[in-house]
Amino acid sequence: MFKSAASIEKLANRLARLPGIGRKSATRLAFHILKLSREDACELADSIREVKDKVGFCSICNNISESDPCRICSDPQRKQDVICVVEETSDAAAMDKVEGFDGLFHILGGCLSPLDGIGPDDLKIMGLMTRLEKGVTEVIIATNPNVEGEATAVYLARLLRPLGIKVTRIARGLPVGSDLEYADSATLTRAMEGRQEY
Amino acid sequence: MPQEKTEAVILKSFNWSESSRTVVFFSSDRGKLALIDKGGRRLQSKRGRLLSFAKLEVSYYDSNKESSGYIREVELLKHYSLEGDGALGRLAFASAACELLYDLLPEEQPQSALYQYFVKYLSLIESADKANLSGIFLAFFLRLLSQLGYNPSLAWCAACRKEIAVNGDSTAPLKFSPERGGVVCASCAKAGDYYILLSPASHRLLQTLQVASLTEAASLPIGYQETLRLTEALTKFVSFQTGTSSGLKSLEFLEKLKNSKLLK
């Protein structure tokens, strides 16, 4: 395609491997990078290298981190006896914004999924069980409110309840700022079931 | 693009960007139908949530070209809740049916009777006693094969078409040949060929399930190992007859649950 500049083609090919980037977008990005100043282009390259060199996984909660244990697990100000279980790192980042929650996280690395053949041993549940031996009093299950997330929650609850630990599930219902008229009956049913005294 | 409306259940979906995905439905009047769900992964999407294991009314822009149509609006008609007692088993058997339909249904060929049968199946998977889920699933599997023209031969030899006679007290296993399309009599069985051995009881059970309604099948409690054996025979049969991959991930999931180190 770019016979006079094979390196542009190589860069476009690499960019096209990224999710959501097609061949045309990759070519546009490659030309944009070519037009960047040398400093900006090198900064971009260094950032990519740095991410690969420095970022790893926390050996306790499986969150992505530049240190082990991660910033959250090593923070003594956080409640050490409450663990919020989520599917992915991005879920932990979202839950960390929740006001009033200052416990720890545990990232499962996915959820139980019959259609994808993902069973309990494919998730980081064993690590969670080990953590529970250190005086944990509550496990908050914050898996997604879809069929697979619910199945994972059911499985975890069944596994944890016999240990005498308080197991809770985040509430399900209407998102803030949404319109009732657009909500489906399943969501409204959940919202009604989870209503609270005002 | 013309606007259409159909009743459908989701079989599978593939995310292809931050907010969009392709959703494959089993539609009451269009059969297997793939539609693009633009922006549907966003929480604030106002065209209705796409729930798995639910009867949905889907309004969409049809496409006459090779590309798929677009979902315009979704209305939930009935959600099959798979929670409660035996939730993981219910989820696995509901998923297994979706997997089979996704693999076996031809694109956009109406299968109205099969759709109604599938909806009834989901309803029973939601409500039946967990001990009876296997029977319901196997009956669904056999009916699906029959509707699509892949009925395994159980009463007659798949090779010579002679009736398979089993003595009442016989315990000798019967040879089920996925490649030849069913049970093979002793004189047609060749040494060195691949067979799945079925006990006379398993053979009788398959024959019963082949003609049983879903409600009748729901009154036949079938053991876990027997379910796995019969499912293996049927999935191998499907694999040989249709060229699709053998094995159902959803039932492998059940195996994984049963063999999990966490429960030991």
Image (tube, coloured by chain):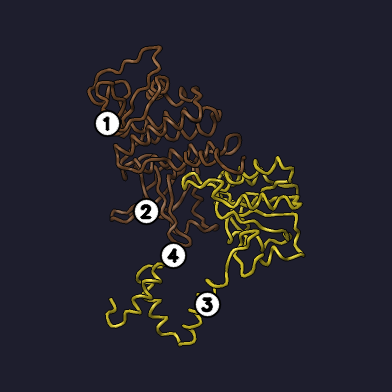
The span from disc 4 to disc 2 (Cα, nearest Å) is: 26 Å
> Residue visible at 49% across and 49% down?
B50
Please give the chain letter of the residue carrying mark 4. Answer: A
> Residue visible at 76% across and 50% down?
A137
The span from disc 3 to disc 2 (Cα, nearest Å) is: 43 Å
Nearest-to-viewer mark from 1 and 3: 1
**Residue B21 occupies quadrant:** bottom left
Describe the element under mark 2 as helix, strand or loop: strand
Q: Quadrant of the C terminus of chain B?
A: top right
Q: Which mark is residue A47?
A: 3
Find residue A74 and report its horizontal and vertical position in percent.
71, 65
What residue is disc 1 on? B180
Q: Nearer the viewer, residue B165 or A38?
A: B165
> Residue visible at 25% across and 21% down?
B187
Q: Which mark is residue A19?
A: 4
**Residue type (three-letter) at the residue carrying disc 3:** Ser
Q: For residue A132, say whether it is visible.
A: yes
Same chain check for tags 4 and 3 = yes
Nearest-to-viewer mark from 3 and 2: 3
Q: Residues within 10 Å of mark 4 (few under 14, many from 20)?
A: few
Q: Nearer the viewer, residue A152 or B73?
A: A152
Describe the element under mark 4 as helix, strand or loop: loop
